[in-house]
Image (tube, rainbow, N blue to C red):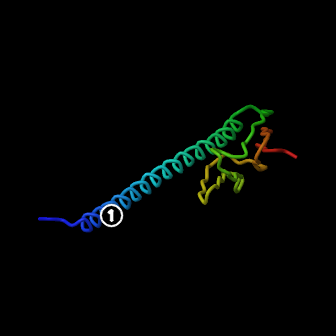
Amino acid sequence: MKYSKSQMALEFVLLLGFLIIMMTVIIILVFQVNREKVEEKIDIKMRDFAITVQNEIIYASEMNLGYNREFTLPDEVENTAYNISILGNNQIYLIYNNRSYYYKIPEVNGDLRIGSNKIIKTESQIILNPG
């Protein structure tokens, strides 16, 4: 069977087009998988961060009267902005990138803030950032 030059050129262009489409699909899939891994890493870091804050408050509740400690909450975790607060005096509420988490804590008065925080234990309560 004899092929003409134009038929060979057409087959080459079709094959090249198919290969370009396949490479594009593969690149998109690789980027998607990578993005999911990055989001998962951020999620793990955020949950670890919230658990660290939770542990700080639990630790204060277990200490002797007069316990006093300062700790700092960073502006961002893994280059991701977040908001953290006390909800209902007994939960930590963490929100970032349309995700939210709640963590149970002993009852506290006050609220968390980005930057420097102070926690003290008095006879009757745990106070965050006393006025």
Q: Quadrant of residue 65?
A: top right
Q: Nearer the viewer, residue 104 or 116?
A: 116
Q: Name which residue lies at 29% across and 61% down.
A: 12
Which residue sits furthest front?
5
| Depicted 125 relative to depicted 69: above or below | below
SS for tag 1?
A: helix
Bin the neighbour count of mark 1 within 10 Å (Cα to Cα): few under 14, some 14-19, many 20 and up: few
Q: Quadrant of residue 101?
A: bottom right
Q: Name which residue lies at 35% across and 63% down.
A: 17
Q: Nearer the viewer, residue 72 or 18?
A: 18
Number of marks drawn: 1
Which residue sits furthest left?
1
Q: Position of residue 50 (x, y in %)?
A: 63, 45
Q: Position of residue 123 (x, y in %)?
A: 80, 39
Q: Position of residue 94 (x, y in %)?
A: 65, 52
Name the quadrant of the N terminus.
Answer: bottom left
Is 10 displayed left or right of 32 in the figure?
left
Q: Position of residue 24 (x, y in %)?
A: 41, 58
Q: Nearer the viewer, residue 116 or 131?
A: 116
List the residue tagged with mark 1.
13
Looking at numbered disc 1 in the image, what kind of residue is underneath it? Val
| Depicted 120 relative to depicted 14: above or below | above
Q: Name which residue lies at 43% across and 54% down.
A: 27
Which residue sits furthest right?
131
